[in-house]
C-alpha cells in the first residue's frame, strides 16, 4: 500500500479503469478512487471498456465514467489504477493500450493472482480474502488519511453490498461488516441505495427471470441446478434479463442445490455463464478451466465468440456434474 501511496503522491494525471462489463464492486471501487484523487487535487479520469451497468447509474451522478473508444485511445497518465482485476486481458482493447502506455500501473483487487504478467504492474493492493475491492479502496483512503465525501462512501457501500449479496454470502466477514458500519456512520443510508440499485428494474425484467427459472434442469441428485436463456426466447416473450443475480439466488435457495449455473445468450450471440455455489463446489476452478475466473463461491465465464448456448451448456454440464 505504501508503494501505491508514493506513486500516487508523485502523480499528477491519474487514470482509473476496470474490467469489461464492470459490476457494482468495480464501479464502486473506481468511484472511491476517483473521489480520493479529486480530494488530493489530482487530474483524474475514469475510463472503462464499456458503459456502466444501468443499476449503478446513480454513481455516475458524481463520477464521470467515460467509455473507451479505440479511435480516441486512452488519456496519458502518470498513474493508472486497474480495479477489481489483475489480468490485462480482462480490460479488452483498453488493456492493450494500457500495457503500451508509459505511466505507472497499479492494481486494486481481491481476486487471487493467477496470471503473472511480469513488469506490467508497478505495485498492487491485492487482498484475496477481502470481500470486495471497494473495501480495499476505502482502506487505501484511510491509509492516506484522506476523508472521503458521501458519494464515495455510497460507492464503497454499493461495492461491498454487490460482492457480498447484501451481506449474506460467505465473504460477508467481520471486516466487511465493520467497513459497512463505518460507511453508515458516515451518512450512507442502505435502503436508499438498495432502492436505487435493486428496485429500479423495468417491467420486462421479472418476465426474464420467470423464463430463466422455467428452463431449470437439475443434475447430480439435485446438487447442481442449471438454466439457460436465449435471446430468441427473451425477444419472443418481450422480456429482458440484464442481471441474473435473482435467478442465481432463487436456484441456490433450493435445499439440495450446491452449485448453480445460469447461461445467458447476449444480444449479438456471445454466451456468458454465471456460477455460484453454497458450500462445497469450487466454481472458480470450474470457471478457470473454461476460460473464466472469479472466486470460489462466485465466478463467471464469457465464452468465446462462436460458442453457442447449447455448446456452452454441454461444456459446463460436463465440468459441473461429476
Ligand atoms: Mn469484486
Image (cartoon, rainbow, N blue to C red):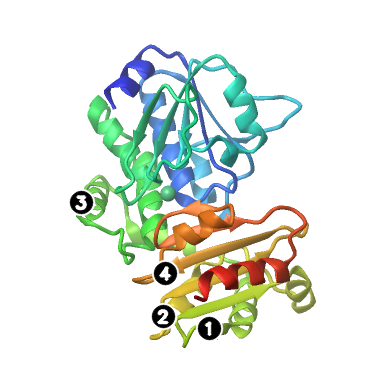
Residue tagged 1: 219
Task: Confirm or reject: label 1 Cβ below 8 Å from ligand 1.
Answer: no
The reply, left or right, for residue 253 in relation to residue 263 is: left
Residue 55 appears in the picture as rendered = no
Residue 255 appears in the picture as rendered = yes
Q: How many marks?
A: 4
Considering the numbered disc 4 on the image, is that residue within a helix, a strand or a loop?
strand
Q: Residue at x 49, y 73 (%)?
A: 260
Q: Are there few (<14), some (14-19), or many (20+) residues within 10 Å of tag 3? A: few
Q: Are there few (<14), some (14-19), or many (20+) residues within 10 Å of tag 1? A: some
**Quick one: label 1 or label 4, which is nearer the N terminus?**
1
Residue tagged 2: 253
**Quick one: label 2 or label 1, which is nearer the N terminus?**
1
Give the CA separation, mark 1 to mark 4: 14 Å
Q: Residue at x 59, y 38 (%)?
A: 89
- Residue 98 percent coordinates (x, y): 58, 25
Examine the rendered structure and indicate whether residue 10 appears above or below residue 72. above
Give the CA separation, mark 3 to mark 4: 25 Å
Q: Indicate which label's residue lies in the foreground, 3 or 1.
A: 1
Q: Do the residues bearing badges 2 and 3 touch, measured as CB atoms within 8 Å? A: no
Q: Are there few (<14), some (14-19), or many (20+) residues within 10 Å of tag 4? A: many
Q: Indicate which label's residue lies in the foreground, 1 or 4.
A: 1
Q: Indicate which label's residue lies in the foreground, 2 or 1.
A: 1
**Quick one: label 4 or label 2, which is nearer the N terminus?**
2
Residue tagged 3: 178
Residue tagged 4: 277
Q: Residue at x 58, y 46 (%)?
A: 52
Amino acid at each position: 500500500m505504501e508503494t501505491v501511496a508514493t506513486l500516487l503522491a508523485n502523480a499528477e494525471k491519474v487514470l482509473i479503469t476496470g474490467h469489461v462489463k464492470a459490476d457494482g464492486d468495480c464501479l464502486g471501487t473506481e468511484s472511491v478512487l476517483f473521489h480520493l484523487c479529486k480530494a488530493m487535487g489530482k487530474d483524474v479520469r475514469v475510463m472503462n471498456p464499456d458503459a456502466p451497468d444501468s443499476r449503478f447509474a446513480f454513481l455516475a451522478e458524481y463520477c464521470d465514467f467515460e467509455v473507451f473508444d479505440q479511435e480516441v485511445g486512452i488519456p496519458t497518465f502518470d498513474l493508472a489504477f486497474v480495479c477489481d482485476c489483475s489480468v490485462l486481458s480482462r480490460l479488452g482493447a483498453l488493456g492493450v493500450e494500457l500495457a503500451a502506455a508509459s505511466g505507472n500501473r497499479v492494481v486494486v483487487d481481491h481476486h487471487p493472482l493467477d496470471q503473472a504478467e511480469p513488469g506490467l504492474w508497478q505495485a498492487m493492493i491485492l487482498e484475496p480474502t477481502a470481500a470486495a475491492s471497494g473495501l480495499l479502496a476505502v482502506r487505501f483512503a484511510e491509509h492516506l488519511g484522506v476523508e472521503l465525501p458521501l458519494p464515495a462512501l455510497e460507492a464503497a457501500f454499493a461495492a461491498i453490498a454487490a460482492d457480498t449479496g447484501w451481506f449474506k454470502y460467505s465473504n460477508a466477514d467481520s471486516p466487511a461488516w465493520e467497513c459497512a458500519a463505518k460507511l453508515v456512520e458516515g451518512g450512507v443510508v442502505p435502503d436508499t441505495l438498495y432502492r436505487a440499485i435493486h428496485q429500479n428494474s423495468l417491467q420486462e425484467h421479472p418476465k426474464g427471470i420467470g423464463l430463466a427459472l422455467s428452463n431449470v434442469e437439475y443434475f447430480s441428485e439435485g446438487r447442481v441446478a442449471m438454466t439457460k436463456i436465449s435471446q430468441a426466447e427473451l425477444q419472443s416473450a418481450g422480456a429482458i434479463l440484464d442481471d441474473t443475480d435473482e435467478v442465481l439466488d432463487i436456484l441456490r435457495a433450493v435445499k439440495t442445490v450446491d452449485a448453480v449455473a445460469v447461461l445467458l445468450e447476449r444480444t449479438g450471440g456471445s454466451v456468458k455463464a454465471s456460477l455460484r455455489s453454497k458450500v462445497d463446489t469450487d466454481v472458480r476452478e470450474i470457471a478457470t478451466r473454461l476460460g473464466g475466473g472469479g472466486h470460489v463461491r462466485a465466478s463467471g465465464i464469457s465464452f468465446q465468440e462462436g460458442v453457442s448456448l447449447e455448446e456452452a451448456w454441454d461444456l459446463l454440464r460436463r465440468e459441473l456434474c461429476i
